[in-house]
Amino acid sequence: MPREYTYGPFQSRRLGLSLGINVLAKFKLCTYNCVYCEIGLTEKDNLVSPNYRISLPPSPNFRKELKSIFNYVPHLNSITFGYNGEPTLNENLVDFLNIASDVRSELNWTHEKPILTLFTNSSTLFFDEIRERVKKFELVLAKLDVANNDDFKRTNRPQNEVPDIEIIIESLMKLKQEMPKKNKLAIQILVYNSYKKDFLPNNNSKNIYDVAHALKRIKPNIIQIYSTARIPAEYFVFAIDNERKKEIGYIFKEIINDDKIEINIY
């Protein structure tokens, strides 16, 4: 049957064998226009306020599509919502989650059941009703590439109604406190370099230390440090090397000083 919602499964650096679920339209819709985005620039008309909402409920095809794929791939690691922008902009996000959970429970898996995962850029988490939806996912991968407003504006290029980075950090703290103990919060930090001499990348000492102190406050279950692996939105962006990733991991470990928090480098 033709696919309306899913793509993959594909091998993910962070999630293993992952089936992608798109709950947005066929075009990118986001509150950010990140310089490193691996699905390209956000078009001007599609760079939206965190207050913006769409109503796109799942059609009956969603359940059929999942069943069809699960029957052929009974060994997934993750059913992953995201990829085509910011999924929390869809008011029907939990409807998709509930169907995926139902279909997952009906099947016999050759390994453990795949985790129900959500990607979010964290920009909408200051809304109580958004956190209420997001906390239902078994694994939440939330973005925090920066922890000061100068780096925020340069790196993520947020729409002008997105709140300051401090409010986003506080929202992540609230989300972690509100999530059921069985669910996990992972903070993703994509760190990059720049070829442009007049463009400061987020791989600068101030930002790295600011992010470390923000992570100490948020207390996520998992921290994920990675860099670009595909063509970024802006030509001048390029990946940091593995030695720098390890160095950042060491800085985070020293400042956070909490052995219960898992730090992973990709």
Image (cartoon, grey):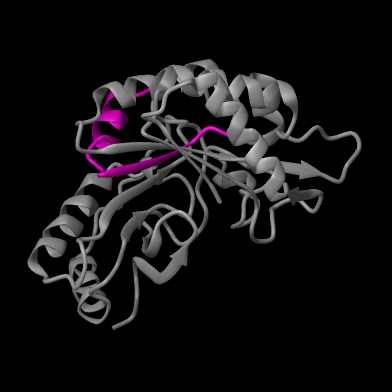
Write the residue at 25% across / 36% down. Answer: 133
Q: Residue 147: name its quadrant.
A: top right
The magenta span reads 126-145
Image position of 130 with respect to 195: above or below: above
Where is residue 210 shown, x and y percent of the image? 62, 19
Write the residue at 20% across / 59% down. Answer: 100
Pick out the residue farthest to the left.
Answer: 106
Image position of 230 with respect to 237: above or below: below
Write the residue at 22% across / 45% down. Answer: 94
The answer, for residue 157, to whether it is visible in the render is no
Where is residue 190 shown, x and y percent of the image? 60, 42
Write the residue at 31% across / 44% down. Answer: 139
- Work out whether residue 44 or residue 184 is closer to the camera in this orientation and state it: 184
Q: Is residue 106 left or right of residue 196?
A: left
- Work out whether residue 91 or residue 77 is closer to the camera in this orientation and state it: 77
Q: How many marks do you count on the picture?
A: 0
- Work out whether residue 245 or residue 80 is closer to the camera in this orientation and state it: 245
State the quadrant of the N terminus.
bottom left
- Work out whether residue 237 or residue 96 is closer to the camera in this orientation and state it: 237
Image position of 131 with respect to 186: above or below: above
